[in-house]
Amino acid sequence: MENWEAYFYQPKPIEELIDSAVIVIDTNVLLAAYQWRELTVKEVTRALENLAEEGRLKVPEHVLYEFAKNRPREIMYRINDVEEAISRLQSPKKIKEMVPILEGKDSFKKTEELSKSYVNSLNEYKESLKGLRDDLKDLFENDPYLNAVKKIVSKSYLPNSESKSIEDLTKIANERYKLKVPPGYKDSSKDDNNAGDFIIWHSILSLKNDVIFVSGDKKEDWVYYDKKGNPVNARRELIEEFVIANPGLNFTHISPKDFITLMNPNISDEIKSDLSIQSSDSNYSSMIGVNDIEIFYQKIYSLFNKIEQSINLMNEKSNGFPEELLNEYQILSKNFNILLEYKEVFGEEDYLKKLWEIKNSLSALMIRINIVLRKNNY
């Protein structure tokens, strides 16, 4: 095939490739397991094990590098989520302190008994959460999923280029990024591993087979996607580059959900729901928009201001702002200030992820506050 013919190349539908193509998985597929249910992890690992046995699965070395580097972070995210849930659990104010004048009433005694029962249940729940936290910590030393991935990779390892070092590939990537040549130019501003996508792409180009790339990545330098964020197809430039490097062969991109559904059309809705979750390795630079970061800050500050106004309003016109909501607000405020103060400690993507989570938490809190305001006719 002459190079100009690549401009007119039409790859085969993925349904025609699924039974014979080489399957390459992205880092976010491996990392997403730490957010999935057990049945989903088993379904995905079973599919990958079968492909590895057939010799049709390839896991690039750089995917393993990113997985090993980011896996502890994924576990820590889960641990921090549980820690935050524990910190939000507050024992109620004692009944005697609220309504001492009613101490002799039957209603007082009943409420006090229920309060004690509630506190006992709350403490049991807190201890149970601590147990979950400790189980998560154990994953650093005993992780069945990590063992399963190791077994799969032992039969599907795709080493980095022998002819080009990581430094060489990084230089090539940066030259491509200047011209916005996909993939990876959306990561050009990252301080660390900004050439990761291109290094993986370079490994894919070395395969002399039809290739299906399974990735949860929705960055526009990999795929075209619709208004709902669903990937439609691989970027045309990628298909052309692949065809020029591998005449007559096909390259396509597919989401984990669509891939597993093709492999097993009978999977449950629960698994499909899990597979729609992006890992924390999602590109928050793209989701927030690095060029629009100031606008994103403004949204966060606006939410803080609205909540402050609601607190002041309820303090002026009622018995005060609900303690549960106030505690949640104070935690978010503290976390936001810590994030700003120690910005340099975080990598760019970690920092933006934390911003994204705080903004979403503030939005959810504002919704709950609005419900309280409506109930009180404010």
Image (cartoon, rainbow, N blue to C red):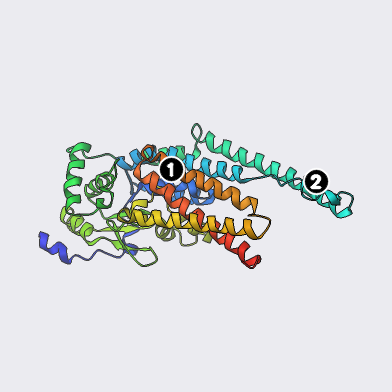
Q: Nearer the viewer, residue 86 or 279?
A: 86
Residue 279: in sight, yes or no? no
- The residue sitting at 48% across, 40% down in the picture is 75
Disc 1 residue crowd, few under 14, some 14–19, many 20+, Cα 10 Å:
some
Helix, strand or loop status at disc 2: helix
Q: Earlier in the sequence, mark 2 or mark 1?
A: 2
Residue 153 visible to an observer of this rendering? yes
Residue at image location 39% in from the left, 48% down from the top: 352
Establish if 160 lies above or below 22. above
Between 50 and 347, the residue placed more toward the observer is 347
- Asked whether 165 or 156 is in front, the reply is 165
Residue 374: image x %, image y %?
62, 67
Mark 1 element type = helix
Callout 2, which amino acid? Answer: Lys
Vertically, is 228 above or below 274? below
| Mark 2 to mark 1 CA distance (whole Å) | 40 Å
Q: Tell me where residue 130 sits by quadrant.
A: top right
Q: Amino acid at mark 1?
A: Leu
* Disc 2: CA contacts within 10 A as few (<14), some (14-19) or many (>=20): few
- Would you say 63 lies left or right of 44 here? left
Query: Front-most of 267 and 233?
Result: 233
Give the left or right position of residue 313, taking residue 195 as reference.
right
Marks 1 and 2: in contact by CB < 8 Å? Answer: no
Q: Which mark is residue 96?
A: 2
The percent coordinates of residue 88 (x first, y second) are 61, 46
Image coordinates of residue 357 in percent, x first then y, are 46, 51
What residue is pinned by disc 1? 339
Q: Quadrant of the N terminus?
A: bottom left
Q: How many marks?
A: 2
- Disc sitting over residue 279 in the figure: none
